[in-house]
Image: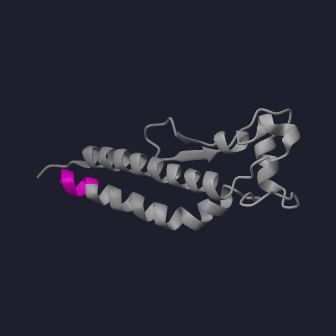
Amino acid sequence: MRWYGEQVMQCVRQAGRQELERQADRILAVSQQEYVPLNKDPRMAWHKGTLQRSGTVELDPNSNVVGVTIKYSVDEPYDYAALQHEVEDFQHDPPGQPFYLKRPFTRMKADAMARVGDRILLALRGRL
């Protein structure tokens, strides 16, 4: 009898990280296309799309952890991305709205995690 615990865990981490990153990219794309406010003020034309383009997905650098961070970041003297995300009173032109990352994440997370699980199972079936 042989024990393949390390190989199994390595397979789970690798498949999980790859699919989690793919799903985070999907959530970010939906956020950018359907939710992020676009600045249409002609006095701030230089700013149009800056928030939308600032979205990123980052894998957790710890190889033993399967995790990602989805975030927006705009260099301003204040946290512009967080302010636009959290303040419900701002009047955004459609489709922009507050909670532009939270809403697609909440909507898509169950499906995303199911896809991660499916990917791990497929990877394990191919290795066992």
Q: Residue at x 72, y 39 (%)?
A: 50
Secondary structure that dominates the magenta span:
helix
Q: Residue at x 75, y 49 (%)?
A: 38
Q: In front: 27, or 62? A: 27
Q: Residue furthest front?
A: 42
Quadrant including the C terminus:
bottom left
Q: Is residue 117 above or below residue 14?
A: below
Q: Residue at x 67, y 59 (%)?
A: 102
Where residue 72 sits in the image (x, y, percent)?
A: 68, 43
Q: Quadrant of residue 7?
A: top left
Q: Image check: 95 left or right of 15? A: right
Residues in magenta, as a range: 123-128
Q: Image check: 67 left or right of 56? A: left
Q: Residue at x 32, y 44 (%)?
A: 10
Q: In front: 113, or 55? A: 55
Q: In front: 113, or 107? A: 107
Where residue 122 sits in the image (x, y, percent)?
A: 27, 58
Q: Image check: 44 left or right of 118? A: right
Q: Residue furthest left?
A: 1
Q: Image check: 4 left or right of 95? A: left
Where residue 94 sits in the image (x, y, percent)?
A: 75, 61
Q: Quadrant of residue 46?
A: top right
What colouring method underlies this structural image?
Answer: one colour
Q: Is residue 117 above or below residue 39?
A: below
Q: Is residue 30 above or below residue 78?
A: below
Q: Is residue 126 magenta?
A: yes
